[in-house]
């Protein structure tokens, strides 16, 4: 597990460094294309590791499920964040002041592509998959969710509540997306669209830091529990409820189809209905 994790980190950091050195500008189409190149390298690296090191089939990133599942994930991520933002606005915590235009669209696309691909490959494709084999589905979901939240505590303007919110909402939702399909495309799409929608569409900080210049000119007002504070709307209690409920809905479907797996010390009986969900 650690070898595969280190391998993907090496590929991601190496290709990212190359792109940063050869591509000028911080908000250009080339920046987005560079991010796509990094993502492709990560996918190819994962496939190579599965084939020549683990010597197993690539069931997590098969090209067959790319378009329908990635597309569904993009739609789910964008709709979830938009719905959550609408709820915050109705509660008086978010205002749209005007329309800016393209803004930092290329930077936000690059961020969405890289974060969605790299983080899902590491946390769901490697950590979740191996932990599930050893400890079972529920332990793997709990541990990867906790690690995913803890990984955000060092972000700018992060708080312990923000890390907890990320662990609950994103950990459960993205883990459930992987369990539902047993592939990474759906989780990658949800992750990427969530980040892109909050950063570019609503001009909200993506996991802390400065608010990007996005499509809409917006303002967050009110208590941190409602607006997420300086970390961004994903640290809002509303986001935690909306995303977690979506994840629970997926988990219910997983359980109904017999898609959970026991720890390695419990003999597993595979039900005849357990097959990955096809979204198209």
Image (cartoon, rainbow, N blue to C red):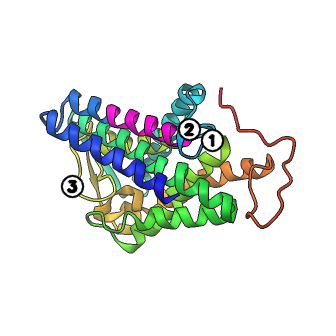
Pointer 1 residue: 56
Instruction: Please name whichever residue, 143 or 209, is drawn nearer the observer in this view of the structure.
Output: 143
Pointer 2 residue: 51
- Residue 250 in percent (x, y) is at 66, 48
**Are the two marked residues, 2 and 1, in contact with CB atoms closer than 8 angstroms?**
yes
Q: Is residue 65 visible?
A: yes
- Please name the predominant secondary structure of the magenta segment in the image: helix
- Residue 131 in percent (x, y) is at 61, 61
Please name the residue shown 74% across and 63% down the image.
Answer: 264
Closer to the camera: disc 2 or disc 3? 2
- Residue 119 in percent (x, y) is at 43, 50
Q: Distance between the residues labelled 1 and 3?
A: 43 Å
Q: Can residue 242 be seen in this view?
A: no
Please name the residue shown 44% across and 39% down the image.
Answer: 45
Q: In the rendered structure, which disc, 2 or 3, sits on the residue that comes first in sequence?
A: 2
Local crowd size for mark 1, using a 10 Å CA cut-off: few (<14), some (14–19), many (≥20): few
> In screen coordinates, is 48 left or right of 253?
left
Q: In the rendered structure, which disc, 2 or 1, sits on the residue that comes first in sequence?
A: 2
Please name the residue shown 37% across and 56% down the image.
Answer: 233
Q: Distance between the residues labelled 2 and 1?
A: 6 Å
Rendered-image quadrant of the C terminus: top right
- Residue 27 in percent (x, y) is at 18, 35
- Residue 210 is marked as 3
Magenta includes 50?
A: yes
Q: How many discs mark residues in the rendered view?
A: 3
State the SS at label 3. loop
State the SS at label 2. helix
Q: Give the range drawn in magenta.
A: 36-51
- Residue 280 is marked as none
């Amino acid at each position: 597990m650690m070898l595969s994790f280190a391998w993907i980190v090496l590929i991601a950091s190496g290709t990212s460094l190359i792109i940063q050195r050869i591509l000028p500008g911080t908000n250009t189409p080339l920046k987005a294309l560079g991010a796509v190149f990094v993502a492709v390298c990560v996918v190819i690296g994962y496939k190579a590791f599965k084939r020549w090191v683990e010597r197993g089939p690539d069931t997590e990133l098969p090209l067959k499920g790319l378009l329908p599942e990635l597309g569904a994930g993009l739609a789910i991520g964008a709709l979830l964040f938009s719905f959550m933002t609408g709820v915050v606005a109705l509660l008086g915590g978010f205002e749209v002041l005007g329309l800016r235009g393209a803004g930092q669209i290329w930077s936000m696309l690059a961020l969405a592509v890289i974060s969605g691909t790299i983080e899902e490959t590491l946390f769901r494709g490697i950590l979740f998959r191996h932990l599930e084999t050893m400890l079972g589905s529920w332990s793997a979901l709990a541990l990867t969710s906790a690690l995913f939240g803890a990984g955000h505590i060092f972000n700018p303007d992060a708080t312990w509540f923000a890390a907890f919110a990320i662990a609950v909402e994103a950990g459960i939702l993205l883990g459930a997306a992987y369990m539902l399909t047993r592939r990474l495309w759906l989780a990658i799409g949800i992750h990427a669209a969530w980040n892109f929608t909050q950063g570019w569409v609503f001009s909200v900080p993506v996991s802390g830091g400065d608010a990007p210049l996005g499509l809409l000119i917006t303002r967050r007002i009110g208590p941190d529990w409602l607006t997420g504070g300086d970390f961004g709307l994903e640290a809002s209690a509303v986001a935690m409820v909306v995303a977690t409920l979506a994840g629970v809905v997926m988990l219910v479907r997983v359980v109904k189809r017999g898609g959970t797996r026991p720890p390695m010390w419990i003999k597993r009986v595979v039900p005849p209905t357990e097959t990955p969900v096809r979204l198209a």
